[in-house]
Amino acid sequence: MISRRNIRVKVMQTLYAIDTMDAETLRPGTATGLLNEKLDQTCQVFTYLLYSVTNVALYAETDAIARSSKHLPSEADLNVNTKIAGNEYVYQLLNDRGFQVNLDQWKLKNLPDTEITRKLYTQLVASEIYQEYIQEEGRQKNKEKQIVEYIYKEILMKSELFLQHLEDTFLHWGDDASMMDVLVSNYFNKPQLFNFLQLISKEKIDYARELLLTVIDKKEYCLELIKPKLQNWDPERIAAVDMLLMEMGVCEFLYFPTIPTKVTINEYIDLAKAYSTPQSGQFVNGILDNILKDLEANKLVNKVDRAKK
């Protein structure tokens, strides 16, 4: 399912968008509206990527019908192997009611380009791993999983044509690209854990909104804590993303009692490395660590066991 790290990314992106907006365009609900859109898009992209895997697999049946319908079909045309179309992961997805509801709700069935799907399928058929897959008798779970993962990682994600299709289809595909590998991998590892009607739990949605609104509400106070620690840094050279991540980190220290401070620091170091400059991880780590020491010295950090909450 969507992780807290993914949630933090969406909150960061929302805060960045708000900071770049004209103040006159901001209205009550603008922030949460933008956040909801970003969370919703993540769910759409994830669903569409899985749908694209099924489309490539199911194209085996389309290919078989087309080739057998030739005026003078060859023996090969009459014996196209369609084993991949019955892959158990493909079957499970297509029979998942929540998955189908999402496809219909977001009109994702209208998005695939048939010619792109054909080219992706042709590339799959030419691969050694596919030939090995169709030659094996029966269905072994590890092989069923291996081939759908191959379609995603080696066919879809390495196709310039398909990646361009994603960019053209989803305005902010670049925002989601880095987290999709993990989400798709998690699905193929434990599909039974995914509820497509609630890809983001209520707890995480509440956390996302609370973090967003807390950072906005406590911005001035957070800056009062951060700025004194920037004495040896040129404010003009501090990346905007770094400042947002530090504000988010400080808010988690102070206002999210169930999130351990170590988890907060590690998460924002990773996000700084992934979304800001090469030096940002070390920078964010140093500033947050210094702020945390001051807060703890003044007994302003109160953490509780989540289980005891």
Image (cartoon, rainbow, N blue to C red):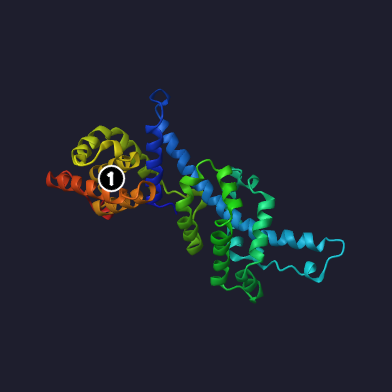
Q: Furthest residue to the right?
A: 71
Using the rendered view, name the quadrant where residue 167 is placed: top right
Q: Is residue 215 above or below residue 161?
A: above
Q: Is residue 69 left or right of residue 41?
A: right
The answer to whether 98 appears left or right of 293 in the picture is: right
Which residue is disc 1 drawn over?
249
Residue positioned most to the bottom? 137
Q: In the picture, which quadrant includes the N terminus?
A: bottom left
Residue name at image x 27 percent, y 42 percent: 251
Say which quarter of the image contains residue 79. Answer: bottom right
Front residue of this view, candidates 93 and 148? 148
Camera sees residue 79: yes
Please state if 103 lies on the left or on the right of 237 as rendered: right
Check the image and report above or below for 150 versus 252.
below
Q: Residue at point 74% right, 67% down?
A: 80
Q: How many numbered markers are drawn?
A: 1
Amino acid type of the residue tagged 1 in the rendering:
Gly
Q: Position of residue 24 (x, y in %)?
A: 40, 22
Q: Quadrant of residue 224?
A: top left
Image coordinates for residue 188, horizontal then vertical, percent: 51, 62
Which of 9 and 102 lies nearest the eye of the viewer? 9
Q: Nearer the viewer, residue 91 or 183?
A: 183
Q: Secondary structure at mark 1?
A: helix
Image position, residue 43 (x, y; %) = 50, 47
Q: Left or right: where does residue 22 sit relative to residue 45?
A: left
- Furthest residue toward top: 24
Can residue 259 be seen here? The reply is no
| Whole-percent x, y for residue 184 in the image | 50, 57
Q: Is disc 1 surrounded by few (<14), some (14 to 19) or many (20+) residues within 10 Å?
A: many
Q: In the image, what residue occupies the spot 56% across and 64% down?
A: 150
